[in-house]
Image (cartoon, rainbow, N blue to C red):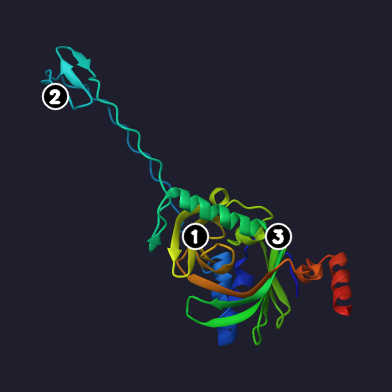
Amino acid sequence: MIGRRHRLAAGPLLVLAAVLVQSQPVAAQGSFLDGLFGRKEEPAPAPVEPAAPPAPVAPKKPAPQAAKPAKDPKDAKAVAGDKIVTPKLPAKAAEPAAKVAAVGAPLGQEADAAGVLAQANAYFNGITTLTGSFIQIGADGRRIGGKLTLAKPGRLRFDYDQPSPLEVVADGTSVAVKDRRLGTQDLYFISQTPLKFLLREKIDLARDLTVSDVSNDPGGVRISMEDRSTLGGTSKIQLFFDAEVKTLSQWRITDPQGYQTTVQLSNLQKGRSVEGTAFFINYGRSEDKAMEKQIRAQ
């Protein structure tokens, strides 16, 4: 059964969660979906009762105060007779511009970090299509593989290896999480996912996300960022490149509740021809049903 739904609803998500818990191969998918969309079991906020207005209090007249002795010139203000004098303090030296924070083996200068970001932008903006394999490592340590297909702008597909029944498809507008066994799908807006760096036709990591760290890692470079527009709150994203920033080797997403999912990439190929029908989503309209029949007949 295919439903059109762009808002989170508790019912379908609870059903999906129940299915994910039934067997280990399927349960391994939960953390990846949470990495994309945030945890789904967030409790509703407790209602806040309005506070009672305070009782009116009669204003008090200020008591007269004796003139205080002049303070040290370092103070912002000093008293001289009946006048308040504001002494001039020496101007502070301008603070240097903040640099990108680094952990591990940090890059030496801010210019180096800017250069790495420029190379990463060039890598993503040079992609038209991308195919390859992935291994997902969930927050519970479970691993499962699959195939990745991407076509810019906005189209993405994850096909999990058997026995998992799940596939994730983005068609440029929405992201559909499909369960082939149950014949169901749940829809999300692409803007709710933290994978914008893969889906946008042109991206500037420093402008579109919040870069917090650019560091050297063994055998490569790591870029750490935050995305505050994802479902459920802020997601933390780490991108891992080779030393020349020419190949993306993995990404790591920590969702707003602190659960971490790692996706390791291999056999990536850029520029290969891919079928546009791979990114088709059936929204339940008559033209969608006709198109799905046509695709299945091919």
Q: Is residue 191 left or right of residue 139?
A: right
**Quarter of the rendering occupied by the N terminus:** bottom right
Q: What residue is disc 1 on?
A: 223
Q: Quadrant of residue 295?
A: bottom right
Against 90, residue 152 (above or below) is below
Number of numbered discs on residues: 3
Secondary structure type for disc 2:
loop
The amino acid type of the residue labelled 2 equals Lys
Q: CA distance from mark 2 to mark 1?
A: 50 Å
**Quarter of the rendering occupied by the C terminus:** bottom right
* Other residues around mark 2 within 10 Å, as few (<14) / some (14–19) / many (≥20): few
Q: What residue is disc 2 on?
A: 71
Q: Nearer the viewer, mark 2 or mark 1?
A: 1
Residue occupying the point 89% across, 79% down: 297
* Mark 2 or 3, nearer chain start: 2
The front one of 43 and 72 is: 72
- Give the x, y percent position of residue 238: 50, 63
Q: What residue is disc 3 on?
A: 154
* Mark 1 or 3, nearer chain start: 3
Q: Is residue 87 left or right of residue 164?
A: left
Q: Nearer the viewer, mark 2 or mark 3?
A: 3
- Give the x, y percent position of residue 137: 52, 77
Secondary structure type for disc 1:
strand
The front one of 40 and 77 is: 77
The front one of 181 and 215 is: 215
The amino acid type of the residue labelled 1 equals Ile
Q: Is residue 246 left or right of residue 96?
A: right
